[in-house]
Amino acid sequence: MHEWALAEGVIKTIKEYSKDKKIEKVVVKIGELQQIDIDIFKFALDELKKENSMNKLSIILEIEPAVLKCRVCGKTWSFSENLKELDDFIAESIHFVPEVFHAFIKCPNCGSPDIDILKGRGVWIEKIKFKGE
Amino acid sequence: MDPRLSIINERLKNIERIIAVGSGKGGVGKSIISTTLALLLSKNNKLTGLFDLDFQGPTCHLILGAKDEFPTEEKGIKPPQINSVYFMSIYYFTRDNPLPLRGWEVTNLFRELLAITRWDNIEYLIIDMPPGVGDEVLELLKLINKKEILIVTTPSILSLNTVDKLVKLLKNLNIPIIGILENMRVQPSDIVKKYALENKINYLGYIPFDYSIEKYIGEINLFMKTKFVLNLEKILHEKILF
């Protein structure tokens, strides 16, 4: 239930951002790298919405595939290619702290660990739409 | 928008004191002082947490005698208790593998760990700061509201020169400095005391170089009986735990 902690951040940010204005819709991006359990994340958001009297708020979750790029040779690849080879310990560590992938994943072309995450890192509030906008 | 920013201080709000141990300079004993401070506070019946903020060269786990512990998941992650100290480190996730990170990644890592770690009922949080005034240090200074800095230096012109840069930064930002602790003294010297006086910083005292501690790293029962620990304990009671 580490997803709960991230959901708390989303709800608290929405509350702080909304102040007295009515929010209609929020778009949350979920980067593939963090391997969030979407069902647990949705459940946590729903529970927290109830606790915060935000039942009618629509939160749309969009999953963003993770793309990595080697800073040495320029090779670009999808994290899903790495995913099938990761053992449980590494997968769980990346799930908790995505940057940990730097300790375990190397460029498939040149072997460098100097890798950039082009997209799809973690949880991010992409858009907040107010009523009447 | 980064949802982690709004919950970082929420996670820390019930902690009575957050003491970050810093120097600017590497190799002056920050990690051993941070870890010992946490162990001593715990020995004095304070619920204490220790956060190793050195992502690229963490060592607190070695001093603390960590083995194969791993945080438990409960609406976030809960740091395991090792020798009575609630301990969080990147070591749990990387073990002994190198973690090559660039600027923004360090920031992300810091925010993620602070946002998901539940310290629950601790009274004291000790933070072992990495050397330099880079991303981890800047994030700590920017994002953690309630903090005090304990400065560590050796009685060396070279150390003090670097320490001075951190002190200037802290003073510019009006961040409270508990005092300056002189570590690894091998012969009589007054340069640290003089520096503290000139810069209006509380001089906490000195700890003589203790050759024995190296062999007790990770052996907490023996480590806690060393002269190094006894000296730090005296300073803790007189100057920090008031």
Image (cartoon, helix red, strand yellow):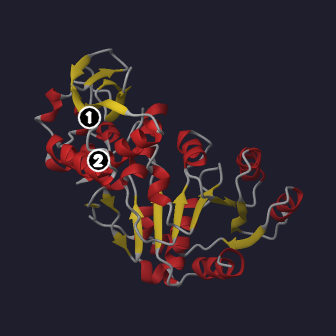
The residues tagged by marks 1 and 2 sit, at their Cα atoms, a distance apart of 10 Å
- Which quarter shows the N terminus of chain A? bottom left
Kindly state the secondary structure of the residue where label 2 is placed: helix
Q: Amino acid at mark 2?
A: Lys
Kindly state the secondary structure of the residue where label 1 is placed: strand
Residue at image location 44% in from the left, 54% down from the top? B58
Mark yes or no: residue A90 visible. no
For label 1, count other residues whose C-alpha is less than 10 Å away and answer few (under 14), some (14-19) or many (20+). Answer: many
Name the disc covering residue B203, or none. Answer: none
Q: Looking at the picture, does residue B228 appear above or below residue A132?
A: below
Q: Amino acid at mark 1?
A: Ile
Relative horizontal placement of residue A103, taking residue B147 as reference (left or right): left
Q: Residue furthest top?
A: A74
Name the disc covering residue A59, or none. Answer: 1
Q: Are marks 1 and 2 on the same chain?
A: yes
Mark yes or no: residue B199 visible. yes
* Residue on which the image places disc 2: A49
Residue at image location 85% in from the left, 66% down from the top? B190
Q: Looking at the picture, does residue A112 appear above or below residue B146?
A: above
Q: Nearer the viewer, residue A76 or B219?
A: A76
Which of marks 2 and 1 precedes in the sequence? 2
Total number of numbered labels? 2
Relative horizontal placement of residue B193, taking residue A70 as reference (left or right): right
CB under 8 Å between discs 1 and 2: yes
Relative horizontal placement of residue B213, taking residue A117 as reference (left or right): right
Which subunit holds the residue at mark 1?
A
Q: Looking at the picture, does residue A16 appear above or below residue B118?
A: above
